[in-house]
Image (tube, rainbow, N blue to C red):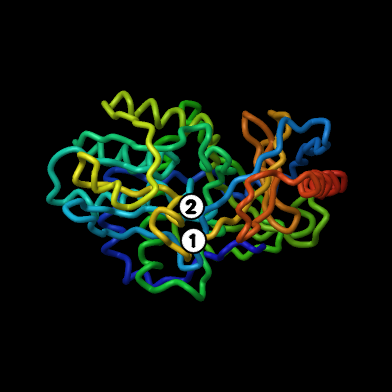
Amino acid sequence: MRPAPFPQLDRRAVAAGLAALALPGCATTRPESAASTAARGLCLPPVKASPDRMIRAVAGLRPYRKSGFVVRRDTLGDTALVHNYGHGGAGITLSWGTSRLAVDLGLPGHTGPVAVIGCGVMGLSTARLVQDAGFAVTIYTDDLPPATTSNIAGGQWHPYGHFDRDSVTPQWRAQFLAAADYSWRRFQLMIGDAYGIRWLPTYNLGGTERQLLPTFPPENHELTRAQHPFPIDRAARFTTMYVETGRYLRQLIRDFRIAGGAIARRKFTAPGQLAELPESLVFNCTGLGSHNLFGDTGMTPARGQLAILLPQPEIEYAYTGRFGYMFPRPDGILLGGTFETGQWDATPQDADIARIIDGHRRLHADLRCPA
């Protein structure tokens, strides 16, 4: 399954949205240019892709909507309800941005405590922004990390697999650009070991469309056959951020609790139950759960399967494309993957995991040093 491309947008149509989401005083960090690094002709150490190095296999269900994520304000009687869900494979990437959009829809004119439904990356990001605005927050959730879909995410900052370009509106495209811009800069404030976020050079090995937007990620650099080590004629290279999701979510929960937040375990089966909460403003960050809870039939799971191998600290690059993807993290080497729409079974399939590992093994067996 090919990832969804970045849309081509009229920048003037979203200028106001970008200004509203701006992070004052935040300068965009520019890592070293990929072209200069590629020109060194560095050899890349191979990933030891074999079944005997696998720590575990996992499968997650991405909350995919052809028409893109939902950020919208509704009402339930006297309760204001703001939706923030349906991000497909771009949940980590867009989390701060769409949460910013949602908070800006919900907070103006509100007084009193606030409820957030869901404790994945979207719920935690929304809750932290509400706290930053000075409100008391309770997160109501059925599952806590590490038992959330966000924990299984690969953690690459790159909007992927979250809309069908023929199904979205110009208004949604404007939301997307504003959210991506804010999120790109917000994550840069959190680079380092505390949140498990770092920059990595990344190779695009073809089979995916990648239309870049200004300021993020830094520009693609096309490489000749002599400038990369992979067994294909053409590749490209860019630099982006990677998030160690387990560490990142644990830190967000710590931040939330330090700021006075409360977490209550509760499962909701009908929208009316939200109106019974003591808070008069509720943010719905239930992801795929909105399919049943709010009857969003446009929501469908897109199963992603991963083989996680023992860590290799010497692997300081990543890749995506026709061979799948490889993201190195301190907690393991992530090999993917699949994008299986309509599949509700979150169980890794032995045959698929074996195929993923073998595909990466064959790729690395053919690595060579650039000329």
Amino acid type of the residue that numbered disc 1 sits on in the rendered structure: Met
Residue 58 appears in the rendering: yes
In the rendered structure, which disc, 1 or 2, sits on the residue that comes first in sequence?
Answer: 2
What residue is shown at x 83% (from left), y 54% (from top)?
231
Q: In front: 60, or 25?
A: 60
Residue in view at x 55 percent, y 65 percent: 5
* Residue drawn at point x = 38 percent, y = 73 percent: 170
Say which residue label 1 marks.
Answer: 299
Q: Say which of 273 and 73 sits in front.
A: 273
The image quadrant of residue 58 is top right
Q: Is residue 290 above or below residue 130?
A: below
Q: Name the residue under label 2.
A: 288
Q: Where is residue 65 in the image (x, y as percent from the top left)?
A: 49, 63
**Picture layout, residue 361 above or below residue 235:** above
Residue shown at 42%/55% (left/top)?
A: 180
- Image position, residue 328 (x, y; %): 66, 37
Residue 5 vertical position relative to residue 205 in the rendered view, above or below: below
Q: In this view, does 344 lie to the left or right of 117?
A: right
Q: Is mark 1 on a helix, strand or loop?
A: strand
Residue 271 placed where, x, y %?
32, 52
State yes or no: discs 1 and 2 in contact (Cβ < 8 Å). yes
Q: Where is residue 129 in the image (x, y as percent from the top left)?
A: 29, 41
The amino acid beneath tag 2 is Leu
Q: Which image quarter is the N terminus in? A: bottom right
